[in-house]
Image (tube, grey):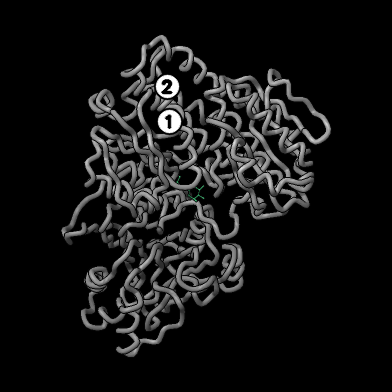
Amino acid sequence: MCGIVGAVAQRDVGEILLEGLKALEYRGYDSAGIAIIDPKNQLTCLRTQGKVQELVNLYKKSPVLGKTGIAHTRWATHGKPSECNAHPHLSGETIAVVHNGIIENYESLRKELVQAGYHFCSETDTETIAHLIHQEYTNTHDFLQSVKNVVKKLKGAYALAILNKAEPDHIIGVRFGSPLVVGLGIGENFIASDLAALLPVTQKGLILENGDIVDVHRDHVDIFDKTGKKTNRSIYESELTLDAVNRGQYQHFMLKEIFEQPKVLEATLQNSFSDHHVLIESFGHKARELFPKIKQIQIVACGTSYYAGMIARYWIEDIAQIPCQVEIASEIRYRRTIVAPNTLFVTISQSGETADTLEALRQAKDLGYMGSLTICNTPESSLVRESDLAFITRAGKEIGVASTKAFTTQLAALCCLTLAIAQHTTPAKNLKKLVEDLKHIPEIASKTLETTNRAIKDLSGYFADKKNALFLGRGIQYPIALEGALKLKEIAYVHAEGYPAGELKHGPLALVDKNMPVITVAPNDDLLEKLKSNLQEVRARGGQLIVFNDDQTGIKNQEGIMSIKMPKVNPILAPLIYVIPLQLLAYYVALIKGTDIDHPRNLAKSVTVE
Ligand code: G6P
């Protein structure tokens, strides 16, 4: 989703802003722009449709000097991707605004502004904000006060960065639902959607709270909370380094992140065990008090994180023997729910800023849950700050839009959660083997990458002319089939569906012919024999099977069946391992199809609007 960068410095900020936009490319966008107040006190604005590189090329042709500026990558909501809908939006050649989020009442505001004589150049909701601030400033001649007055009129969830040519020594930021951080430098200060955008200039930041307005000057920043009171926010040092946001030897971030999985799984599991049990404290200091009382769990998430939740349900009900429900955040927030006593509300999120998940958490607070826990990869995110308990996955920065290492570390965390709760419901001796097997997962992940990478790369050519694919799994592998299908859709633009193999004959079998690849995850578990029967149904209709399985399954390469062998793994933990070849498959098919793997069309990494 949209990315914001702003800078007030003693040096020219153009390149800093463009570097910042490049670092925010991972969020997904379709156009970009920059506005700078130049030494002659002119407000210069450059905007392009397409990649940030287009903007960089334009900037190189006509560089803009100036020490105060804002910049933006836009992910279209109101109005198609185009140069005139790209941000910044200007009013009266004086005010420039960049915006992430949605202004819900923009139509009525726009009408009033048109009646007041304002002319609109774009179809966006954002331009309304620029004109409103211009209108207020014409009356008050006080930039900060104007922004404060305008914010009172806006409805929706948003983050803003605003520039005023008449007051060139500061910029103003607003956080109201969408993320915004302040970057602290020496004699220069910044704002951005994510501190990763500012790594070349600072690792030190302030996290704004919802409703905060920040007035950023070269030598100081003033923050006002939602009541208008001047306030302080605590300083944090980002653990991110420039290395973490570089591709290194890999052609794409996605491949780098797939190969990082053994390391980040190890990091996620590292501090969670003492001998043969999970440390309850890894979930936060209140966990010891809450966990023994849990009678039910409600998991809520979006996208790939939702599939992690689906897998956790199998674990929680099977191992901890506690009822567990899983729901998509954008669904649960809009229906009446009945909360059973002592239900823990669990969110799962890589970014910690997904609008629907965050809103679902906020609603849950009034619904009588015993408490909230988030499994999250971003320690400074809104979900972590607003939940009672948090388990931080150690995936590190994930840049590729398609989630890979974030997913497997979420699974590792959810398995730890299951084991932590199970300590109160199940005899310790039943859990010991599982803890030991979980500790070996990073090693098995590494072996999986080693043994399957080449075979999957070779296999990908088979998909060059394929337009559809089916993914099958049974039991705990069903969500892995869904995730495999999602990956192929997201980055290779191949229409794919994930199905529980037992459902095949209730519909999808009608699609099976020699042009339909059927990818199956088939570890040696209790459902293997039933799955084999489902595979026969596919073979009998001429479908081409690609089966991921281990030596013990007895599945062999033969006409119509490509068997890819996987290392041995405890079947209950197999989702952590069997998703890896499906990630590789999506990657190599996308490579053949020539898609933009790290930034697939129309998608965003962090979905901060509902
Ligand atoms: C977007 C991303 C997905 C991600 C989903 C949920 O759709 O492209 O990869 O799974 O958002 O994001 P979250 O940050 O909450 O895990």
**Image vertical order of residue 254 relative to residue 179, above or below:** above
Q: What x and y, as percent, mark residue 417? A: 38, 27
**Image vertical order of residue 262 relative to residue 310, above or below:** above
Residue at mark 2 to residue at mark 1: CA–CA distance: 12 Å
Q: What x and y, as percent, mark residue 577? A: 59, 29
Q: Residues within 10 Å of mark 2 (few under 14, many from 20)?
A: many
The residue identified by callout 2 is 319
- The reply to whether residue 182 is visible in this rendering is no
- The reply to whether residue 502 is visible in this rendering is yes
**Image vertical order of residue 72 relative to residue 534, above or below:** below
Q: What x and y, as percent, mark residue 573? A: 53, 24
Q: What x and y, as percent, mark residue 519? A: 68, 38
Query: Residue 327 versus residue 91: which sits nearer the camera?
Result: 327
Left or right: 320 with respect to 444? left
**Image vertical order of residue 451 relative to residue 199, above or below:** above
Query: Residue 400 versus residue 427: which sits nearer the camera?
Result: 427
What amino acid type should be assigned to the residue bearing mark 2?
Ile
State whether label 2 is within 8 Å of ligand 1: no
Residue at (80% x, 36% y) in the render:
560
Q: Residues within 10 Å of mark 1 (few under 14, many from 20)?
A: many
Quarter of the rendering occupied by the C terminus = bottom left
